[in-house]
Amino acid sequence: MCGIVGYIGEREAYPVILEGLKRLEYRGYDSAGIALYDGQDIKLSKTKGKVADLEKRVSSEIDASGTVGIGHTRWATHGVPNDVNSHPHYSNSGNLVIIHNGIIENYESLKQELIKRGYTFTSDTDTEVLINLIEDVKKNENVKLGKAVQIALNQVVGAYAIAVFDKNKPNEIVVAKLGSPLAIGIGDDEFFIASDATPFLEYTKKAIYLEDEEMAIVRRKKGVKIRKIKNDSLVAPYVQELQMNLEQIVKGGYEHFMLKEIHEQPNAIKDTYRGRLRAKEGIIKMSGIDDNIEKFLNTNRIIVIACGTSWHAGLVAEYIFEDLARIPVEVEYASEFRYRNPIITENDVVIAISQSGETADTLAAIKLAKSKGAFVFGVCNVVGSSIARETHAGAYTHAGPEIGVASTKAFTTQITVLTLIALKLAKEKGSISNSNFHLHLQELELIPGKVEQALKSDAHIKQVAETYKDAKNCLYLGRGFNFPVALEGALKLKEISYIHAEGYPAAEMKHGPIALIDEQMPVFVIATKKGHYEKVVSNIQEIKSRKGKIIGIVTEGDVDVKNLADHTIEVPETLEVLTPLLTTIPLQLLSYHIAVLLNKNVDQPRNLAKSVTVE
């Protein structure tokens, strides 16, 4: 989950690397560091804290000149966040330096062997072990850096994206990947290395995404040579043209990326169904489904695998698929699925959902499902990501870059894609009438405008947030399609405000959680006038009789809940199956405003990182 950046070329490396680290800070922000080569020696500066802290330290600690360098922003795994454990890490000789995203699982046994050979260690990290292993191989095998990296990596167990520099080979950087993302930007006689493409967007739109178990030697002016780590065979580079632009990754006048991304949802949803949904013609066109339609129509069941917010989107999909397409669905945490010896057959379809397309547990679950013969379909946001490459087929959401760690537009665009798939399968199976199918398409096409309308309640939602910002615990309740939205609302509050919150099906409240209700307990209830509305109203009455505080998410014009609730927030009316796309909006805004009022770091909440690329 760390972010890595590197540069080799003719321009000054420091500004490129520093700005790149700022753009990758969503991946980790416990500590940061940079190593620059000035033509004679490696200059290193690193610190606990954020990239801004590194910037201050560099200005007082080193001469930041040089046209080769590597940088790192860390999410701690081995070793607490401090100056010493920060990356980059030197080898014992000081000739080699490394940055690393991932985990070396057998680092302790490697470390003990290296200690026997006379190596010493100053940090608690697995990364310092790796750089000294590379140095040991280089010295004892009498090989160049690239070969030393290859031999060393064949001895490690774990995940990594690394960049290694040798001051005795100053015109090259060696990189390698297994389980963690790594992109190489191709400029004019210059090259960029990063965890994703955002650090080099203004310099080049050409990028190579390394595959697992590949390494590359990036040489100044001479280009990129890629090899397989296991067998040393050469790989022809595949250069992609990047689609994103610089404007997408700046705040655009908003105070935080999260707020910007909440407000981007009308366009993100529209971009996600653009070219796929033709409501007037009654057509859904999705090549990943069209080309594999028999797999979906003949499946015994669909298994959804995901983590976090994507798992909540999968739960919404379970309701949608079973209601519309009449296909049984199971939703699994990828982290549990991969370890519990699941029953998977060749007749199963597995849908893997991930914003980044790099989630380690989801990737491992995909590989397990494929090994059992299942057909695996990916839903992710990042073009060229590992999940996009590992699955048999898939569909991209078109949310654009999501920088805020707490996911917002990824959730609604994932639901949009999954709804399109469910509707398409329902039509193919004949489980939905033509008139109802057309109605759903028309309503889905109207959703961006209705999200825009829901966003207009922002000022009112901020007032509600003022009332409940000092709560210590909160409950979120929903039924049917909106039960997963209750889970997602609770997660958002936990993630960015650090207030304990739990989501429940509304009817489950009296099976335990009702014991928590008192005048200090805010209860956020999704109570749209669809589905089991009367049952939810009954649940609200149970809470009110115990003096709980009710905040209702209701359909425009609602009277019954408004008469019972302490506060209500209205959303436009739509079909029940589409309500999650609207009811999640006020819950996102509530979490955002509560966190801001509590002076929390909204975009970079403690202990979290955007893309969980380690177990």
Image (tube, helix red, strand yellow):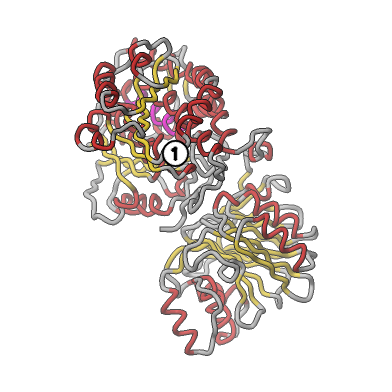
Of residues 494 and 146, the one drawn nearer to the viewer in this rendering: 494
Task: Name which residue type carries label 1.
Answer: Leu
Give the residue drawn at x 72%, y 73%: 42
Question: Residue drawn 32% across and 16% down?
Answer: 530
Whether residue 393 is visible here, answered yes or no, is no
In front here: 428 or 86?
86
Quadrant of the rendered structure where residue 528 is? top left
Residue appearing at x 47%, y 89% in the figure: 116
Q: Which residues are magenta?
A: 413-425
User: According to the image, label 1 marks what residue?
Assistant: 493
Q: What residue lies at 50% left-to-right and 89% top-to-bottom?
A: 117
Quadrant of residue 513 within the rendered picture: top left
Whether 414 is among the magenta residues is yes
Dominant secondary-structure state across the stretch colored magenta: helix
Query: In screen coordinates, is 268 left or right of 184?
Result: left
Location of residue 269 with respect to 331 vertically, above or below: above
In terms of depth relative to the viewer, which is nearer, 547 or 388? 547
- Quadrant position of the C terminus in the picture: bottom left
Q: Secondary structure at mark 1?
A: helix
Residue 526 on image: x %, y %: 36, 25
Q: Is residue 591 visible?
A: yes
Residue 263 against residue 145 in the figure, above or below:
above
Q: Position of residue 582 (x, y in %)?
A: 44, 23
